[in-house]
Image: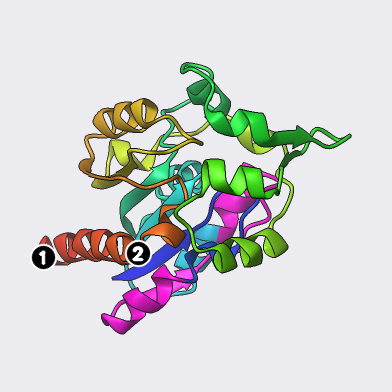
Amino acid sequence: MHIVLVHGMGGSDYDWSSVAPLLRASGQRVSVADNMSQSLTDDVAAVQALVDAVDDDALLVGHSYGGAVITNAGTHDRVRGVVYVAAFAPAAGEAVRDIVERYEPAEVSHYMTRADDGAWIGVESEEARLALSWDVPEEAMVTRRQRRRASADAIFTHPTGEPAWASKPAWYLVATLDKHLQPAAQRDMAARAGATVEEIATSHSIPLAAPEQVAAFVSHAAASLSADG
């Protein structure tokens, strides 16, 4: 089983820099996407290219917006399952924005700004860090800030195709203290997907805040698929 890790909006492969080494140390084979967050279609194609590049079945793992990417990319014939880490798991015809608008605005809305072209940019300040990612080591947030990209509005408005979770096993790790994606939304999406669920009391930035727990959750999913043959 080959594990493909997919970051969220505006992120980079650095977002998985604490999880990937733990998975590799446990014997897992891992690839990490580094998507541009400008087009859902392009990000899906990039992840499916990573699946094509490995000679094995794949397990896709998505954080935040990365969940929308794996929901679409996971229809690839060689993808065996999908793991959501405080992530969007849209249904057919549903966009990320549709999910967000069904719930009360999350605290992150106070720390977002728009570029002239409509791109979304997170406000990078100490106030924002303490409000949204208080449990992430400060040095990790500094590096993440340096690697951060603006995210095109199109990634939030593009409708999803047939979701991978409708036909493949799914797992969902809920962040109960999330200030980006409402925990109620996470639980609702997990239930809709028929996912195996665990909850953890962290911020939205689970891969950097609790890498050991994320690695264990992903490893459990991979082991379950391997046991099923």
Seen from the viewer's position, the closer of residues 91 and 24 is 24
Q: Amino acid at mark 1?
A: Ala
Residue at 65% x, 29% y is: 110
Q: Amino acid at mark 2?
A: Ala
- Against 25, residue 14 (above or below) is above
Task: Describe residue 131's horizontal placement relative to residue 170 as left or right.
Answer: right
- Dot 1 lies on which element? helix
Q: Earlier in the sequence, mark 2 or mark 1?
A: 2
Residue at 53% x, 55% y is: 7
Determine crowd level at label 2: few under 14, some 14-19, many 20+ residues with C-alpha closer than 10 A.
many
Q: Which segment is the magenta one?
A: 18-46
**Residue 73 shows up from this direction:** no
Q: What residue would you read off at disc 2?
A: 58
- Against 100, residue 48 (above or below) is below
Q: What residue would you read off at disc 1?
A: 227
Q: Quadrant of the N terminus?
A: bottom left
Q: Position of residue 2 (x, y in %)?
A: 35, 71
